[in-house]
Amino acid sequence: MPVQRQRWTQVIRPKLLRWISALAAAELLVTGAFFAAEPVRAAPAQKQEELRTLKQIYDRVSLTTGLSWQAVAALDRYESTLTRAHPKTRPLREGAAVGVFIDEKRWAGPLNPDPSDSNPVSIRVFRGIGQDGDGDGKADRGNDIDLLYSLASEVRRFGTFSDDFAIGLWEYYQNTRAVQRVLQFTKIYHAFGKLDLSHHVFPIPVGSSYAYRSTWGNSRGWGGVRIHEGTDIFANYGVPVRSTSFGIVEVKGWNPYGGWRIGIRDTDNLYHYYAHLSGFEKSLQPNDVVKPGQVIGWVGSSGYGRPGTQGKFPPHLHYGVYRDRGLVEWAFDPYPMLRRWERDELKALKVHK
């Protein structure tokens, strides 16, 4: 058995099997429809043009690799989130349309005497991964299509279905989180059938009674000395809690600190954490796709104890956001985003009155 297959079977596969089956990778990775998209608020003209350009690139790479455009988009999206998190070590050229970064050694080959080599034949000789994706005879590391085609070809070299694609992802990134993210993003893109998933809403209906302020960094005592990684939005028991974004349910259940909580991952690779709920929307399960405004639970006062513990503090929603940096996640203050989403939603309501 080849080394990579043996390592996959004995070490990696058990950790990822539940994701592969849950996301129905065999159906999602090959070109084809999933379910119909729903229209959302249009983006500004410039952004729409950028999205059209990206879609053309994804369609082209999809056609030449056999992957669905959604899987290609998920690869680029994950790469973009890594580039945003590590701009100094993953520099992109000015005007780049895709977020893919491949360093010179990996592109041209580790022993290639010419790190800027763009000849597909010599690159192959030196075991580089750079390829000619647009048919101009060059494997140009500064070309969006060549970059994305090279990445997509590398991760699909074991196949486009189920375990095979996951093996390719793991072999390329050597990181189970990367495999999980690309599969998650693929499912989200299949679910909504479009690239523009930037719309957000406030987590509590703006017509209800609530109050909040910046509570980032405040000290917390229960469970040891720690800081407050989020914003508390105080409201009455039973007020609906909504998904702020398009995304996929990553976690649902009890946490000693957060009580009944839900964690949702979006295509910006942000993890949205909704805690202290009084209950969940019953039909919602891990790996389900959600959209902005969809009810996921209700305000409560659960947490700070064993499963079912309630009432140790006034009812409120704890809302936190964490950015995945590839190997670790870091929390950041969500208060500015909450204010912006609240303001945008109130403005939209006034316009439609």
Image (cartoon, grey):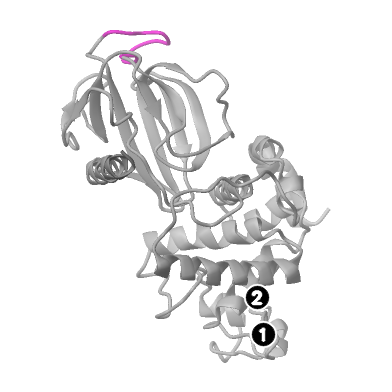
Q: Which residue is mark 1?
A: 123
**Which amino acid type is marked by label 1?**
Ile
Mark carried by residue 337: none
Of residues 100 and 97, the one nearer the viewer is: 97
Residue 297 position, x and y percent, is 43, 22
Q: In the drawing, does residue 344 fall left or right of residue 200? A: left
Q: Secondary structure at mark 1?
A: helix
Residue 339 position, x and y percent, is 23, 42
**Which amino acid type is marked by label 2?**
Ile
User: Dot 1, how many residues are within 10 Å of its Cα: few (below 14), some (14-19), or many (20+)?
Assistant: many
Q: Which residue is mark 2?
A: 129
| Quadrant (top left, top right, bottom left, bottom right) of the C terminus | top left
The answer to whether residue 309 is magenta is: yes
Q: In the drawing, does residue 159 fall left or right of residue 115? A: right
- The magenta stretch spans which residues? 301-311
Q: In the displayed orientation, state which residue is furthest to the right.
A: 1
Q: In the drawing, does residue 329 fall left or right of residue 188? A: left
Q: Is residue 120 above or below residue 265?
A: below
Q: Secondary structure at mark 2?
A: loop
Q: Are marks 1 and 2 in contact (CB under 8 Å)?
A: yes
The answer to whether residue 296 is magenta is: no
Q: Which residue sits at x=34%, y=42%?
A: 352
Give the mark nearest the N terminus, 1 or 2: 1
Residue 147 position, x and y percent, is 58, 75
> Marks 1 and 2, how far apart in space?
7 Å
Q: In the displayed orientation, state which residue is furthest to the front.
A: 353
Principal secondary structure, stretch drawn in magenta: loop
Residue 275 position, x and y percent, is 36, 25
Q: Quadrant of residue 153?
A: bottom right
Q: Quadrant of residue 206?
A: top left
Q: Quadrant of residue 120?
A: bottom right
